[in-house]
Image (cartoon, grey):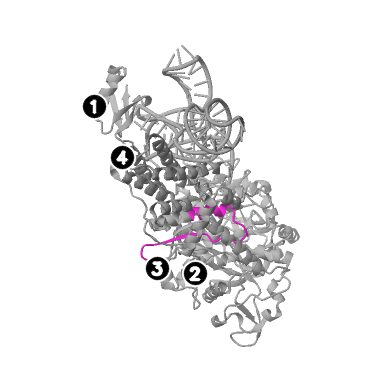
RNA sequence: GCCCGGGUGGCGGAAUUGGUAGACGCGACGGACUUAAAAUCCGUUAUUCGAAAGGAUGUGGGGGUUCGAGUCCCCCCCCGGGCACCA
């Protein structure tokens, strides 16, 4: 018997699929299309288990859909701009381009050794000039339509990476790349106006296809919609008013003080008008000197100072004191609040500490609500609120008070979002240059479209200081204004790499286009992506930005659809030793070695078998032995089966039943991404086949062919090489051209089954009876064969031919 | 604190959505083959009482609904992930 040699077989078929262009989608026709996409990888140099899981799931779907007759598009590319290449350049002097391309080439080889089908003709890389030219094009279109703008703003600054970061890249006050503490700086930076789409990004989550609940929830949280009212608080004896936002207008009568943040735009004016100006200045300065992280870590203990000024409550003209406190954030809402200690825990804590009056205005129906130890924030009824007394707090109470504010021109209904504009400029070298020119006369002028790309300049030293490294190239920096022709300077920042990845899935459709980023008709016919697959770590960043890009490009007339990804699948992480695999922790399990020792087929199978694909899972070295054993046994079984003499046996029907039941079950599990149970179904079939071979030494030709063919086709998406080899050596056919097996209804039910006999729902016996037995017959058999205390039951329940239950 | 998940043998996990809990695999134990080992094959493997037949218990904990609950309802505990002084 020929031994299964994975090295030889896998190499052969990988070459075959590439040479024969087994997958090569003609995008001109989108009929029966299926756009299957794995998130393109950052070329880190080596494939890790996370990639393997991602691309295995992706390939399983590609092959399954191909066999089901779909026109599958499955491209691959590279998220190839980014920090590591630049850091390596600083350290070693190797050019980031060479560094990146070497790694791409290495990873390409590794991906090919996994045996996945990719349409390499459509490959793209974010750092290629013919890609980033069009990233610049899109930037200019956004700029022309006021969706990209430059602004002075307090931004997140990472001292170690020497660059600004988007809010999404700050994790608990730390840089998501290097974990150093992020500082706040006031800088002039580029933003994309994602906030303009906040409402649509939120609503879209309800219309989108099948996305994991947690990803939807995370995006919902991140967008953070709050509805309430915005209104003015007049400062007594001053012309100024302070605008405040609240989600609880119903509690307005309970305001006993107001607070502005230390960075509020009126702080100087207020300080100068106050008798406490020295104390205020001192407090403001000390708040400023704290990092955001320090402020956050002081959540328990609130601090503030009384300005001595009063503001006037617009609903009852009561005067309350105005405080400065850093528990009020500058960059949310208006940077100032009405404080209602009775019904907001933060205000409550502050009022208790500084001995400010606490006035209850909401109570439960029996008016027994107690606010002695904490604020009452639940739904209740208004009290002490004049004509609004008795209204339901969160609903009618709020609505009526908003109506009052509007009618009296004091305020308005307002919706606020937590989502802020996306800060996209980076003071780094290895990224897409921002195609803007600063002209003293004309201001910010986009580069002429015909002059694109704005090429990354060659520089000697990639190290950045406060300035972007691009500023070191005088030839790059100095240019002429495209508008007036006068001397001008180029923008020296590059774009966040998430800009590159916000549209790559559009470019795949038309990756060779040298006239425009993509042909709209083609893209409209292929998008949205039918199935997107990637890690949950992109739940907010990439997946939110891409959604924004598609909506913006739609509004600019380039696209006619609303969402980029109809269905999203997030695979769980593979951990080792209890934590995420990482080089620094030294707990990397290298997939490459398994290609050698066990083969890609066994590795793929194990990755699929180890857990439901959406679950996080701990790597277990022993487990892969099991899937390798399975493949060996499959190989032996099929060769043995194929060599059997062709005479029918009476055991064949049983084998055919298992076969057809497996086809049905596997097909169902496939559509639910339950690949772990697909593998176990195939293992059962394999065991059944072993059993047959042990007992019989002949088989009819038709059964033989059915078993080999269907079993092998079921296995093919999971372990493509071995199945391709078996199929071609037995049938002399290319399995990738075969259709997905169908099951024969006649073989789904067995002639007999185990009838479970229960007494009061508790299993007592199981007896073998023939299929199709009636309730009367079953009851009779039970009475004849068992002492059921036959007079003792009053009711019989017969469930789906499987269980008979006698009830007392 | 809020929002998502989740809690089943020694381990990873199944369970047709209210109907035989523990499929499939790993590991472990026993046996066969072998001079020996590896590989392979055969058996056992939730806990507990029992020599056995068989019984009892059992899906984080406590209640409930039901002939019947891992699955549904109420309360509580724990773990993972996300957000967090967001007014």
State the CA–CA distance, disc 3 to disc 2. Answer: 13 Å
- Judged from the image, the secondary structure of the residue bearing numbered disc 2 is helix
Q: Which residue is mark 3?
A: A525
- Judged from the image, the secondary structure of the residue bearing numbered disc 4 is loop
Mark 3 vs mark 4, foreground winner is 4
Local crowd size for mark 1, using a 10 Å CA cut-off: few (<14), some (14–19), many (≥20): few
State the CA–CA distance, disc 3 to disc 4. Answer: 52 Å
A41 within the magenta span:
yes
Establish if A663 lies above or below A266: above
| For marks 2 and 4 on the same chain, the one whose residue lies earlier in the sequence | 2
A511 or A621, which is in the foreground?
A621
Q: Any mark on residue A648, and which? A: 4
- Judged from the image, the secondary structure of the residue bearing numbered disc 3 is helix
A14 or A323, which is in the foreground?
A14
Local crowd size for mark 4, using a 10 Å CA cut-off: few (<14), some (14–19), many (≥20): some
Q: Any mark on residue A507, and which? A: 2
Q: Which residue is mark 1?
A: A776
Res. A90 visible in picture = yes
Q: Position of residue A744 (x, y in %)?
A: 30, 45
Instruction: Have a look at marks 4 and 1 and say if they share a chain.
Output: yes
Chain letter for the residue marked with disc 1 in the picture: A
Q: Which residues are magenta?
A: A30-58
| For marks 3 and 4 on the same chain, the one whose residue lies earlier in the sequence | 3
State the CA–CA distance, disc 2 to disc 4. Answer: 56 Å
State the CA–CA distance, disc 4 to disc 1. Answer: 37 Å
A89 within the magenta span:
no
């Amino acid at each position: 018997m020929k031994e299964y040699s994975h090295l030889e077989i896998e190499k052969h078929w990988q070459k075959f699929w590439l040479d024969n262009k087994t997958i090569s989608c003609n995008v001109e026709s989108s009929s029966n299309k299926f756009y299957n996409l794995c998130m393109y990888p950052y070329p880190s140099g080596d494939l890790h288990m996370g990639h393997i899981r991602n691309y295995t799931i992706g390939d399983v779907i590609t092959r399954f859909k191909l066999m089901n007759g779909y026109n599958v598009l499955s491209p691959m590319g590279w998220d190839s701009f980014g920090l590591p290449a630049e850091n390596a350049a600083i350290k070693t002097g190797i050019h980031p381009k060479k560094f990146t391309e070497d790694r791409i080439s290495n990873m390409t080889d590794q991906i090919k050794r996994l045996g996945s089908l990719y349409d390499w003709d459509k490959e793209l890389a974010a750092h290629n000039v013919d890609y980033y030219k069009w990233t610049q094009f899109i930037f200019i279109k956004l700029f022309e339509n006021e969706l990209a703008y430059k602004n002075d703003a307090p931004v997140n600054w990472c001292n170690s990476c020497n660059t600004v970061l988007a809010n999404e890249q700050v994790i608990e006050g730390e840089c998501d790349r290097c974990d150093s503490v992020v500082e706040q700086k006031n800088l002039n930076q580029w933003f994309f106006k994602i906030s303009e789409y906040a409402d649509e990004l939120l609503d879209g989550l309800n219309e989108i296809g099948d996305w994991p609940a947690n990803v939807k929830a995370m995006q919902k949280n991140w967008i953070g919609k709050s509805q309430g009212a915005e209104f003015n608080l007049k400062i007594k004896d001053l012309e100024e008013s302070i605008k405040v936002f609240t989600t609880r207008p119903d509690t307005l009568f309970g305001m006993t003080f107001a607070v502005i943040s230390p960075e509020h735009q009126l702080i100087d004016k207020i300080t100068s008008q106050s008798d406490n100006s020295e104390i205020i200045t001192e407090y403001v300065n000390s708040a400023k000197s704290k990092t955001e992280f320090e402020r956050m870590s002081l959540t328990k203990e609130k601090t503030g100072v009384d300005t001595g000024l009063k503001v006037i409550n617009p609903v009852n003209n009561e005067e309350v004191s105005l405080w400065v406190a850093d528990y009020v954030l500058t960059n949310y809402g208006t940077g100032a609040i009405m404080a209602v200690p009775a019904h907001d825990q933060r205000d409550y804590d502050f009022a208790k500490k500084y001995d400010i009056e606490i006035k209850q205005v909401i109570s439960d129906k029996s008016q027994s609500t107690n606010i002695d130890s904490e604020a009452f924030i639940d739904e209740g009824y208004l009290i002490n609120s004049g004509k609004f007394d008795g209204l339901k707090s969160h609903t009618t109470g709020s609505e009526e008070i908003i109506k009052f504010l509007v009618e009296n021109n004091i305020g308005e209904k307002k919706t606020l979002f937590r989502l802020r504009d996306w800060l996209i400029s980076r003071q780094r070298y290895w990224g897409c240059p921002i195609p803007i020119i600063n002209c003293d006369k004309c201001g910010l002028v986009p580069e002429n479209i015909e002059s694109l790309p704005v090429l990354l300049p060659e520089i000697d030293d990639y190290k950045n200081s406060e300035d972007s490294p691009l500023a070191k190239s005088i030839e790059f920096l100095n240019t002429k204004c495209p508008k007036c022709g006068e001397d001008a300077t180029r923008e020296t920042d590059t774009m966040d790499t998430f800009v590159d990845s916000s549209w790559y899935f559009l470019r795949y459709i038309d990756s060779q286009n040298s006239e425009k980023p993509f042909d709209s008709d083609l893209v409209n016919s292929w998008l949205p992506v039918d199935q997107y697959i990637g890690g949950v770590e992109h739940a907010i960043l990439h997946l939110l930005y891409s959604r924004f890009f598609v909506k913006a490009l739609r509004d600019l007339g380039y696209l006619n659809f609303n969402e980029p990804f109809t269905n999203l699948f997030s695979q769980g992480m593979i951990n080792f030793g209890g934590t995420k695999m990482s080089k620094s922790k030294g707990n990397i399990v290298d997939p490459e070695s398994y290609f050698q020792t066990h083969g890609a087929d066994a590795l793929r199978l194990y990755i699929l078998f180890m857990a439901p694909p959406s679950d996080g899972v701990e790597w277990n070295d022993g487990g892969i032995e099991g899937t390798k054993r399975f493949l060996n046994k499959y190989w032996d079984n099929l060769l043995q089966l194929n060599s059997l003499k062709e005479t029918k046996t009476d055991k064949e029907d049983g084998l055919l039943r298992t076969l057809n039941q497996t086809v049905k079950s596997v097909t169902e599990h496939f559509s639910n991404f339950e690949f772990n149970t697909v593998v176990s179904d195939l293992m059962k079939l394999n065991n059944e086949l072993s059993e047959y071979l042990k007992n019989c030494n002949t088989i009819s030709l038709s059964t033989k062919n059915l078993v080999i063919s269907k079993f092998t086709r079921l296995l093919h998406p999971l372990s493509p090489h071995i199945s391709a080899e078996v199929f071609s050596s037995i049938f002399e056919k290319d399995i990738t051209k075969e259709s997905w097996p169908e099951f024969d209804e006649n073989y789904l039910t067995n002639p007999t089954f185990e009838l479970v006999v229960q007494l009061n729902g508790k299993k007592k016996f199981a007896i073998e009876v023939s299929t199709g037995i009636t309730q009367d017959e079953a009851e009779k058999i039970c009475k004849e064969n068992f002492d059921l205390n036959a007079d003792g039951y009053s009711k019989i329940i017969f469930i789906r031919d499987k269980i008979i239950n006698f009830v007392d």
